[in-house]
């Protein structure tokens, strides 16, 4: 992709009352001027101040296409850092196509997915983690996912990483100084201090990589499995949870959410029910397919809702059995049809101290308590609102590589390896951290992969 | 609807990279300021100049919602004529809902459909025909529909009408002067000149009302019927026409047109095939349902494509028959499967001089000639690009009422009725013309009807 060309694309969604077309590149303002006539005589976009709006007309061969508002952004005061123009026109597909065609005819080219944001990265307006977060901000559907993405977009993650980098850089320069004086066998870099630093950095990296499970779950929804024998009311419960959610969403006209299948949001956190098509449509099959299917569901889940029938005599022992089989899974025991059962001899907790929930999915009783149990099952730390949470696989992998390099440095310090080998391992840590923010050279292929999933116009 | 309240709505379509939220009303800028913090210290929207853009943050209880660009428009320099604000945020449903909620919490209310444009009308930024044209501009899907709507939005129709009004007003003031001197039996208003003026105005109104058939067809597509006996290739022809169109539309990524069923656009004019589901899916039924169905299709059509099979011996006589039955319809005789037939003894024209088209729908032969025949069948005057064409039923009806009043004035002049009756009829003409532009008082109910079909955010 040639970054010297001027690019253009529709930036808004389809429909609505107005559409916005973005142009960015060295000649963005001149190209827009070629198709635009300001309403006020003698005004042109080229003579406009940055971040100001001009009203006028876009025409093709003196045939009027639309009345538009055009905002001019002059480099570096724009999203991309380049000269940029935003054309706000009527939201007609006909008009949008005409204007884009005119821009192409006058020297712009169609932008690729994410190309505006890629240019913002290449022009130093943001680092890679911030650029990646832009797509996450747009697609985030829950308060928590939005918060994680927004924090990353604003550079929260980057600033943590650059602090780590800065401290390592001090050491590496000292070690390199040693190498210059290698004949003399001096140690400028204090090995004990370095060991402390590496251990500190490793703790930091461990915290970040550990946050990935949560970050990923927040971004894509916490996978929840509903398991239980046939006819305990699994589908009724799922429908109760989903219908409540559907009634809640979208109370403002024009902003109805996409029909989200099998997803509920509780206090800004998305819970996604896995393999629910199976639960709802082939309840009988679950029995036939037997344990294997249930096992798969439980393994993919972060939280398991274990549904039992209050009328069944041995539900207490079933709770204990499942918990014993999956000791590391968060299982919430739920006794359904509590309305059909006298509340005598019911245990409040499992032998290992977990609460047992008594609900009626049909009568919608105690559903609020189930919500709380779901929230408690995933422990988002109380301080989560400030802590950096990573949610991107690319970041996770680079952090894991940094940790491996950390281990090599630790081992090297232990075995007293030479300064040049030590320096190489420290440089490895730096390189892997740099990959995350794009401070290290980033091959086009990696950039292409990052931006190809963006929408066009961003 | 309270026009003193400040209104807000999402103005762009769903999806995309950015969304724009519009706010309008006396307190638009103050309300936006309550939820916004500029990036540059000490900057507020309230201190911004009109038509300038400020970068900053929208937060809720110190939790960041989004980074946004906000454009300020100060009354009267805005679309509505009121103080207005446009918030350009990331195109996330979550963010858009949050921002709208915050605006509502701070004193704005959700805008009704078309309420921004209605306020533009009420504040004298545009007259009713212009306001109505805004919705047409947005929905126009072809070059001609777009042109008609845009000309109306820019006031082309209004200025024709106000010219007529101005000339009538001169006369009515003279006649009213006569009434003041009624004892003296003087005639200030020259009756011969008035007769000429009324005749001129009537000619004008006739031209406008006559343009409605075309205007309506341009706006909604020219209805075309494809008729013919089973197996003459009606569905093949329709598919050939439609597929060609589908290959043509949308060569710019991100701007694909909605799948338009059974509509083709030739030189900017939409042709809409009526009742084609029947043709394509129940070809056999056409025969069974017999003449009645064909009759209905022909009656609803502006143009009829009469398809005949080149292999059928008597197709010449069939062409003559159909033409005789529907003498007022524009029927294009099309002989299909011309590839299966030696080109001997074929007539080039019908007995009444219409060209007979020989095509092969299957081999896509002579389809270009069919396009031209369709364009020729509807006569858009060569000067159409300048002439005002009306496309709105409300305008058509008001113009028809104006014509009736014109006739009463003419008749009155003929029979020499008194000045006060004459004045009343002239005032009727003025009133009906005034209804069109909204210069006459427009009841809320009429306004409601006009704007209810707008999209929200316009």
Image (tube, coloured by chain):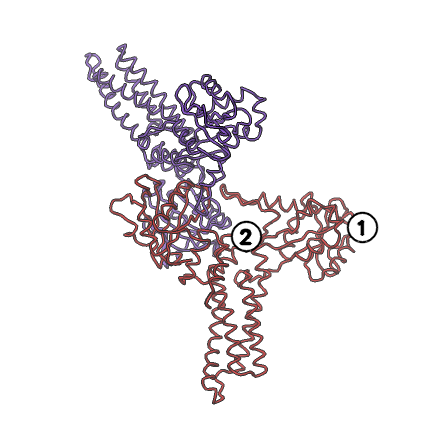
Chain colours: A red, B purple
Q: Can residue A265 be seen in this view?
A: yes
Query: How many marks can you see?
Result: 2
User: Relative to A218, is A276 on the left or the right?
Assistant: right
Quick one: label 2, few (<14), some, or many (20+) residues within 10 Å?
Answer: many
User: Relative to A318, is A240 on the left or the right?
Assistant: left
From the image, tell me which residue sits under label 1: A313
x and y, in percent, of residue A137 in the image: 49, 55
Q: Does B417 appear above or below A437?
A: above
x and y, in percent, of residue B162 in the image: 28, 28
Q: Does B153 appear above or below B14?
A: above
Looking at the image, which residue sits at the far bottom? A184
Quick one: label 1, few (<14), some, or many (20+) residues within 10 Å?
Answer: few
Q: Are marks 2 and 1 in contact (CB under 8 Å)?
A: no
The residues tagged by marks 2 and 1 sit, at their Cα atoms, a distance apart of 40 Å
Q: Earlier in the sequence, mark 2 or mark 1?
A: 2
**Chain of the residue displaying label 1:** A
Q: Does A357 appear above or below B137?
A: below
Place residue B419 in its image quadrant.
top left
**Chain of the residue displaying label 2:** A
Place residue A73 in its image quadrant.
bottom left
Q: Is residue B47 visible?
A: no
From the image, tell me which residue sits under label 2: A142
Q: Is mark 2 on a helix, strand or loop?
A: loop
Q: What residue lies at 53% left-to-right and 80% top-to-bottom? A: A421
x and y, in percent, of residue B215 in the image: 38, 29
Looking at the image, which residue sits at the far right? A313
The foreground one among A152 and A354 is A152
Q: Quadrant of the N terminus of chain A?
A: bottom left
The foreground one among A55 and B305 is B305
The foreground one among B313 and B169 is B313
């Amino acid at each position: 992709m040639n970054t010297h060309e001027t690019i253009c694309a529709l930036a808004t969604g389809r429909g609505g009352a107005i559409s916005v077309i973005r142009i960015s590149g060295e000649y963005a303002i001149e190209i827009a001027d070629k198709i635009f006539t300001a309403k006020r005589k003698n005004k042109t976009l080229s003579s406009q101040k940055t971040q100001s709006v001009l009203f006028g007309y876009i025409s093709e061969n003196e045939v009027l296409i639309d009345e538009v508002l055009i905002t001019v952004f002059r480099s570096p005061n724009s999203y991309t850092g380049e000269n940029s123009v935003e054309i706000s026109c009527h939201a007609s597909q006909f008009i949008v196509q005409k204007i884009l065609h005119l821009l192409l005819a006058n020297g712009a080219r169609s932008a690729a997915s994410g190309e505006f944001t890629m240019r913002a990265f290449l022009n130093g307006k943001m680092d890679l983690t911030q650029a990646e977060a832009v797509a996450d901000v747009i697609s985030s559907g829950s308060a928590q996912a939005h918060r994680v993405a927004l924090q990353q977009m604003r550079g929260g993650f980057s600033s943590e990483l650059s602090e780590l980098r800065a401290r390592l850089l001090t050491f590496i320069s000292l070690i390199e100084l040693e190498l210059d004086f290698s004949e003399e066998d001096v140690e400028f870099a204090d090995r004990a201090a370095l060991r402390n630093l590496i251990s500190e950095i490793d703790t930091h990296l461990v915290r970040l990589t550990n946050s990935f499970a949560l970050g990923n779950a927040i971004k894509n929804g916490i996978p929840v499995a509903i398991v239980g024998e046939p006819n305990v009311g699994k589908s009724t419960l799922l429908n109760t949870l989903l219908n409540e959610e559907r009634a809640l969403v979208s109370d403002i006209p024009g902003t109805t959410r996409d029909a989200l299948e099998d997803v509920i949001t509780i206090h800004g956190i998305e819970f996604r029910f896995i393999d629910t098509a199976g639960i709802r449509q082939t309840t009988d099959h679950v029995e036939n397919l037997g344990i294997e299917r249930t096992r798969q569901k439980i393994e993919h889940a972060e939280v398991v809702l274990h549904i039992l029938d209050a009328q069944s005599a041995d539900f207490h022992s079933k709770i204990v059995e499942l918990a014993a089989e999956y000791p590391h899974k968060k299982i919430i025991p739920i006794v359904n049809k509590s309305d059909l059962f006298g509340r005598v001899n019911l245990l409040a907790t499992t032998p290992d101290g977990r609460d047992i929930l008594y609900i009626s999915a049909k009568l919608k009783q105690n559903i609020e308590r189930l919500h709380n149990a779901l929230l408690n099952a995933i422990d988002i730390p109380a301080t989560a609102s400030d802590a950096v949470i990573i949610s991107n696989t690319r970041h996770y992998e680079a952090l894991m590589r940094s940790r491996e390099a950390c281990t090599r440095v630790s081992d090297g310090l232990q075995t007293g390896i030479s300064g040049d080998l030590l320096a190489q391992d420290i440089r490895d840590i730096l390189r892997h951290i740099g990959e995350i923010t794009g401070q290290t050279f980033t091959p086009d292929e990696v950039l292409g992969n990052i931006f190809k999933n963006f929408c066009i116009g961003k």
